Image (tube, helix red, strand yellow):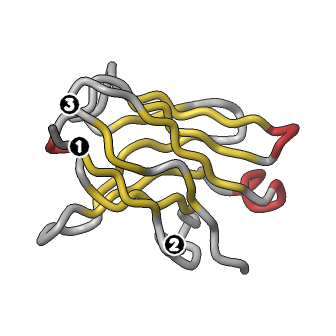
Amino acid sequence: QEQLVESGGGLVQPGGSLTLSCIIQPIIFRFWPMGWYRQAPGKQRELVATITSSGVTNYAESVKDRFTISTNNAKNTMYLQMNNLTPEDTAVYYCNFKKGNGDFGPWGQGTQVTVSS
């Protein structure tokens, strides 16, 4: 399995917005949910949001009502629209899929999101 590639990170002021992108493999997405995860300095990697091929979404409580996960199947791309960002959202963001046995696919390099004034 190829590593997934994330893009779209950057530096943004508190209250700002960013959209992250990730190229997905349709064959994988058909079987397992895709998701966004993040790891802040000194913290463990955590779930941000997931989406299934049927469009069912799930969000971490900390990002509900601010972040939106979506896919464009024609472009084989998954997005994370992030609004009203706070410094607590600063982290490296990764996209990945989780198999039924709990294993993740190979982790990519991630994309850095920094929220700072």
In this figure, which residue is indicated by the disc labeled 2? 104
Residue depth check, mark 3 versus mark 2: number of the one nearer the observer: 3
Classify 19 as above or below 48: above
Q: Among all residues in the image, which is located at the extreme front?
A: 117
- Which residue type carries mark 3? Pro
Name the residue tied to disc 3: 14
Residue positioned most to the top: 65
Image coordinates for residue 53, horizontal then vertical, percent: 71, 40
**Which residue lies at the image location 40% right of the left edge and 57% below the top edge?**
93
Residue in the foreground of this view, choosing between 53 and 108: 108
In the displayed structure, does residue 3 sit left or right of residue 75? left
Q: Nearer the viewer, residue 53 or 110?
A: 110
- Count neighbours of disc 3 (C-alpha within 10 A) and say few if under 14, some if 14 to 19, many if 20 or more: some
Residue 115 is labelled as 1
| Residue 27 drawn above or below residue 51 | below
Q: Measured along the vertical axis of the image, is residue 19 above or below residue 29?
A: above
Of the numbered discs 3 and 2, the one sitting upstream in the chain is: 3
Secondary structure of the residue carrying numbered label 3: loop
Mark 1 and mark 3 in contact (Cβ < 8 Å)?
Answer: yes
Q: Secondary structure at mark 1?
A: strand
Q: How far apart in space, not on screen, are marks 1 and 2 (Cα)?
A: 27 Å
Lateral position of residue 76 relative to residue 111, left or right: right
First of labels 3, 1 by sequence position: 3
Residue type indicated by callout 2: Phe
- Tell me residue 33's x, y (percent): 60, 51
